[in-house]
Amino acid sequence: MKSIREIYKIGKGPSSSHTMGPERAALQFMTEYPDAHRYQVILYGSLNKTGIGHGTDSVLRDTLGVDKTEIIFSSDEWEGMHPNTLDLIAFDAEGAKLGRQRVESIGGGDIRFPGQKKAEGEEVYIEHSFAEISDFCKWRYINTLSEYVELNEGPEIWDFLMNVWQVMKNAIDEGLKAEGVLPGGLNVQRKAKFLYEQDPKVNEPGLLEFQRIAAYAYAVAEQNAGNGTIVTAPTCGACGIVPAVLKYAQETKGFSDQEICRALATAGIIGNLTKTNASISGAECGCQAEVGTACSMAAAALAELYKQNLDQVEYAAEVAMEHHLGLTCDPICGLVQIPCIERNAVAAMRAMNACNLSYFLTGSRNISYDMVCRAMKETGVNLNHRFRETSEGGLAKIYNRKRSN
Ligand code: SF4
């Protein structure tokens, strides 16, 4: 597996697969053809269906040059292709083709060239499953996933994760201050500030907990939808879940920033395992791959903070994923707003519940994290394409039909 740095990417929303990945592909392509007179980009599959709502076209124009870039949304048959495929073509001043590159945006901002099995980047971890990691840790008397991360990535990982945590906290702070309507034309009002400022029934601790965690998740997810700076965890669409639970845990239990970084390391391993063995792409496997993975990451992070053992950490992550299996991706108008923002808040609460269950029930569990990952992948690839970030099914279809009536 690659470094957990690949899970946490700092950048502007709203979509890791539809903006960060294509931006990365365009930057690489530009270095190969820096003197091109003009560029053409052809978007296929989910990039064609939801590229406008996710802002794919504008990020590509901004990267390659507004005046010299033509974007073509292609409805050509894309069976057999990765659902987020784009072709980049460079031309000289006479209109002759200089070169063409096909790229797949595989989720979390990563890209891959067709035929390549994995995204580019150095392999850092020898182990590829939770079972292998668990065996290794028990053999080496390693008690936590964060120690395992340090062993493989070196102590410099802590500076990286501290920066990630600062950006996550900034996104919460900025999101709690922001007001108004999110861009995109759906007229979605920002709600984080409103939620945060409600008078909580202080004698109802469950309500206070929900209000705070939901407000933090909304804050980050709304920053993402408003093109603000966030950290993928593991994607832009699901970026509010991990920061929300960690912020709440820090605020209520007084965990230090260093302890939060250790929790982020644990969460990073869960995200990495899911990315390696299943998917973190909504276009590939539906929202279970994005929000489900983020919920698993958050549950595992909490379990690490609360000093649960390795089996409990695994169970927390497993429970969190198991109850997202089959979750479809059906963003209305192709925007990362409905159902995405609210879903971050609900998943953050689910992560808390998964961590609580793991505390009590790990000894009686039947399902491992590796098993639930396989189930997620199998479920995802068998989901009809209408439910994989095309905005052609579910809420997106019903909402669009209602609007046209
Ligand atoms: S529904 Fe889920 S997977 Fe789809 S865009 Fe929204 S957050 Fe991403």
Image (spheres, grey):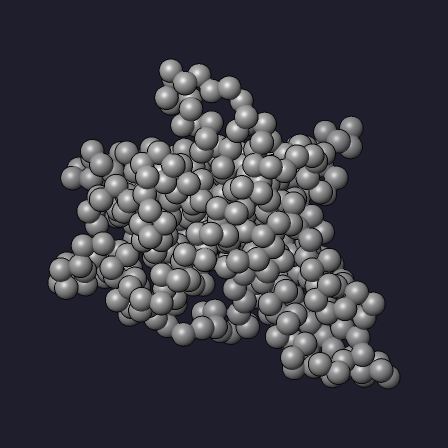
* Residue 4 locus on image (x, y percent): 39, 62
Residue 375 can be seen, yes or no: no
Where is residue 190, by image quadrant? top right
* Residue 362 locus on image (x, y percent): 20, 39
Q: Nearer the viewer, residue 96 or 304?
A: 304
On-image quarter of the N terminus: bottom left
Please give the name of the residue rendered at 57% of the width and 66% of the height, measured from the top-left corner. Answer: 104
Residue 62 can be seen, yes or no: yes
Q: Nearer the viewer, residue 39 or 404?
A: 39
Q: Nearer the viewer, residue 387 or 281?
A: 281
- Left or right of 307? Residue 238 is right
- Left or right of 63? Residue 368 is left
**139 relative to 382, above or below:** below
* Residue 396 locus on image (x, y percent): 64, 38
Please give the name of the residue rendered at 53% of the width and 58% of the height, measured from the top-left corner. Answer: 10
**180 relative to 313, above or below:** above
- Left or right of 345? Residue 227 is right
